[in-house]
Amino acid sequence: MARYLSSLAAIAAVSLLAACAEDQPPPTEPTPRPVKTMVIAGADTAGKRSFPARIDAAQRAELAFRVGGTVKELPIKEGDRLAEGDLVARLDPTDFQIVVNDRQATFDKARKNFERGKELVGSGAISQVDFDQLEAEFKNAQAALETARQDLAYTELKAPFAGIVARRLVEQFEEVQPRQPIAALQNISRLEVKFDLPESVLRSVRAASEGQGGKAGERAVVVATFDDRPGVEYPLTFKEVATKADPQTQTFEVTFLMDQVDNGVVLPGMTASVKVDFGQLVVTAPVYTVPVGAVVGDSQLDARVWVVDEQALTVSPRQVTIGRLSGGEVEVLEGLEPGMRIVTAGAPFLADGMAVTLMPAREQAAPRPEDLQYQQ
């Protein structure tokens, strides 16, 4: 009887284990982790590049009077060539001459009183305090007279350098205010050629320039060409490069200088094409810029990124060499190649061979019901 009960207990235990095994769900595969990625673009600086450029005068100024008045003489016309010191315009000097005459009389009186005071203070006829007052009045009158004479001289506006009158902004007998522009003068014997460089180009050029010594653009071969002179190239000389990007285009303005052409006239406002040979400046390995979140450290604190296999949708680590940090981006000097897809968000939570899904580049909100009614 005992053996029978033991057999029944064993059969019940086996049946219970079989039932539990049937109720347990089969093991599931791990869910792929969603990640945000980017594709490494090819180097953008090698070889020769062409950029649209604009021409401006290397020396230019808007001329204005330092005093106000009525324009009495305006001998210039637009397009006139002026030598340094030529008259541009003259104000009616009548009121200014009256002020000079008044200040001159006050000055003469103060000077005579001061000269007499020198004799009187020596003999004790007046106190030192009274003499100091006469001296102060004399110096004030002298300063007022010099100011009036200077204002009278300011009624003549002369060319500060030789150039061409680009624009005449007022007419004769017009009442003008101090510092109101009268004319625009430009010296077009030397011209500025301005064009915009993308951030990726400028960064690589600067990196190469800093490694070799000197300023970016100084050793690059740069020439300008014009549509009406096909096949003719004009060498340019580096002048300066802006260090702040344009807020709309995110490009940096670069300025070169060129001499006026011999067989024609290039005027400010005209356009040109600038050809730049970056061959002497480009670094051996291209410099890429990636978001800071794409670079993580391994167990040895070495920098690495996670590369996505787009066929298998798995990730693998790749060691990189990083450069400068700028805002939310970091330069990668070695380890990346054009066409690679790397993880830019979620990198700290990945493992070698982990399956991932690619997040869309942009997320769009679901349409509202009222929007769907308008579309029907």
Image: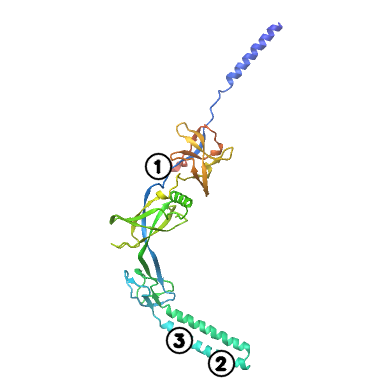
Residue 105, given in percent of the width and then of the height, sits at 48, 88
Q: Do the residues labelled 3 and 2 touch (CB within 8 Å)?
A: no
Q: What's the residue type where badge 1 is placed?
A: Gln
Vertical side of 298 occupied by 72: above or below: below
Q: Which of 63 and 362 is in front in this view?
A: 63
Q: Looking at this view, name the residue that lies furthest to the front.
A: 212
What residue is shown at x 49% (from left), y 42% (from top)? Answer: 334
Q: What's the residue type where badge 3 is placed?
A: Asn
The mark tally for this picture is 3
Vertical side of 236 occupied by 345: above or below: above
Q: How far apart are marks 3 and 1 (CA)?
A: 82 Å
N-term mark: 3 or 1? 3
Please name the residue that numbered disc 2 is placed on: 116
Q: How far apart are marks 3 and 2 (CA)?
A: 23 Å
What residue is shown at x 43% (from left), y 80% (from top)? Answer: 152
Element assignment for label 1: helix
Q: How far apart are marks 1 and 2 (CA)?
A: 98 Å
Residue 120 image-quadrant placement: bottom right
N-term mark: 3 or 2? 3
* Mark sitting on residue 349: none
Please name the residue that numbered disc 3 is placed on: 101
What residue is shown at x 69% (from left), y 9% (from top)? Answer: 5
Element assignment for label 3: helix
Q: Which of 70 and 302 is in front in this view?
A: 302
Q: In this view, does 286 lie to the left or right of 350?
A: left
* Mark sitting on residue 375: 1
Query: Alpha-carbon neighbours of circle 2 within 10 Å: few (<14), some, or many (≥20)?
Result: few
Q: Are marks 1 and 2 in contact (CB under 8 Å)?
A: no
N-term mark: 1 or 2? 2
Residue 314, given in percent of the width and then of the height, sits at 49, 33
Q: Nearer the viewer, mark 1 or mark 2?
A: 2
